[in-house]
Image (cartoon, rainbow, N blue to C red):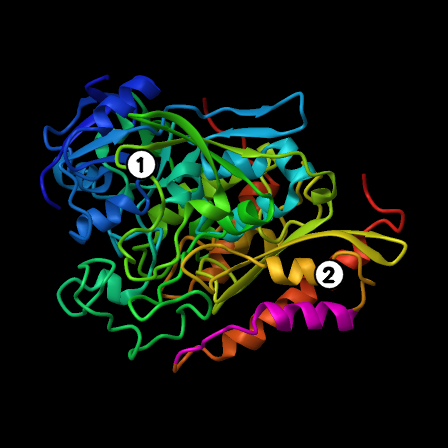
Amino acid sequence: MTPFTFARAADVPDAVRLGALPEAKYLGGGTNLVDLMRETIEKPASLVDVSGLSTSIEERPDGSLLIGAGARNTAVAEHRAVRTRYPLLTRAIVAGASAQIRNMATVGGNILQRTRCAYFYDDDGARCNKRSPGQGCDAIDGFNRIHAILGASDACVATHPSDMCVALAALDAIVHLQGPQGMRTVPLTELHRLPEDHPELETLLAPGELITAVELPALPFAANSAYRKVRDRSSYAFALVSVAAALEVDGGIVRDVRLALGGVAHKPWRAAKAEAMLRGKPATADNFRAAAAAELADAKPLRDNAFKVGLAQRTMVAVLESLLGTSSSGGKS
Amino acid sequence: MPMTISINGAETPLPDDPRVSLLDFLREHLQLSGTKKGCNQGACGACTVLVDGDQRILSCLALAVQYAGRAITSIEGLSQEHGALHPLQQAFVEHDGFQCGYCTPGQICSAIGMAAELERGVPSYVTGDLAVIAIAPDHEEVRERMSGNLCRCGAYNGIVAAVMEHVNEPVRETP
């Protein structure tokens, strides 16, 4: 680990001031950043501990939920309003990592965690455009079973590893940012970038910008929602494919639906095509299958991960069918 | 920012170098070698310790300075008066919850944290109804909740038996 200075931010303005120092990084729980620093993939000159800032979870009068970026993953998963109003978010969080890591990891840090592509981690032995821009990518012709099938580029086929973010993408979560230029909000689905020619640029955060909160808009039908994760062992493993979904059915017709995929792309993948095909259509297995197939139509599998195309489709259909069984016939409102 | 950290009840100066992990601080600076270094990258759970009494974390992924002003309990801090074993340690002995013993301190700290999470009603991946706060700690729940602690000897059956006994019949601990 390269030397760095450490400071605990007193409040958000203090954090943003310290975050403007050269080569500064914000530190949440540290479960990813400390590991990357030990591997000398990350070499910040200073760490600004923001884990004690904005840890509250607030139910607001407009029906939205405002989750402080410093809230620990466990605190979000166990919160009464999350588990009853947005169960897919609780399900996604408890599908991720281990209980110890969920106790440490913050919401902001979970969003900004980096890929677990083994070539990204292998500083001595592999080329990686994300770690060393312009170097090349050894994953594209390497062991790429866990890599992306959607939205990848010739420069990078890494996936975003978060479970939580897949649920946030389905929920149209809004990320609150504070930076040297002031505060702004960005939809979570736009925060992460596709790799294109610059996989080292993972989000649209400006230098020194800090995630302060995540807002979940009111979404009554999210009470009928689920998260399913398919992985190599039944617990404590990253997703090969995951699906977050919410479904509202009225008289056998899909009134509204939310679908997002994990483990398939450089960012949490909102399945907008499938959603558009399903809205207003009969909630049948055939329509679920057609929508899932349409979403994956542009998939470009690599040598080892063609199985993900069918797996993603089957998982989408299975999750929607499970939600059909729990949707009240009159539609939830 | 406080310049000390409480380790098993003793206020202790923090290391000067912020690079020191909580795990190395315990083992190399304080000679508390009960906490084990397995993978040193958050994949095995051998380094699990407790923060502020009952919150389980991985000390390998923690910088000691992050926990300034907090109270850390390691396996050394669990033994009872006159050197008696913690009831969960006793349960591990009775149920053959280990072979080589290397993962055991982490397993025991983790299980204490798990018991507190169950008591609070924190759901797990296998919890059926998220609205239910009183979650029955059955075999499947315990296995899922302890999945962050690997045992390469494969003593899982004994570990689960010891932990189930502890969470289902909590022995009153000496204050």
Residue A134 image point, x, y percent = 18, 63
Which residue appears at 31% of the width and 47% of the height? Answer: A32
Residue A272 image point, x, y percent = 60, 57
Residue A126 appears in the picture as rendered: yes
Disc 2 is placed on an element classified as helix
Is-magenta flag for residue A327?
no
Tell me the number on the disc at residue A278. 2
Q: Quadrant of residue A16?
A: top left
Residue B86 appears in the picture as rendered: no
Out of A277 and B33, give the one closest to the viewer.
A277
Q: Quadrant of residue A228?
A: bottom right
Q: Examine the rendered structure and indicate whether residue A83 appears above or below residue A91.
A: above
Residue beneath disc 1: B74
Give neighbour class at mark 2: few <14, some 14-19, many 20+ (Cα, 10 Å). many
Residue B100 image point, x, y percent = 31, 60
Is-magenta flag for residue A289?
yes
The quarter of the rendered structure image containing the C terminus of chain A is top right
Alpha-carbon span between mark 1 and mark 2: 53 Å
> Hey, what amino acid is under mark 2?
Leu
Q: Are marks 1 and 2 in contact (CB under 8 Å)?
A: no
Tell me the number on the disc at residue A152. none
Q: Are marks 1 and 2 on the same chain?
A: no
**Chain bearing mark 2:** A
Predominant SS along the magenta part: helix
Out of A120 and B47, give the one closest to the viewer.
A120
Out of A319 and A12, give the one closest to the viewer.
A12
> Hey, what amino acid is under mark 1?
Ser
Give the left or right position of residue B94, taking residue A258 as reference.
left
Q: Which residues are magenta?
A: A285-302
Give neighbour class at mark 1: few <14, some 14-19, many 20+ (Cα, 10 Å). many
Which residue appears at 65% of the width and 63% of the height? Answer: A274
**Chain bearing mark 1:** B
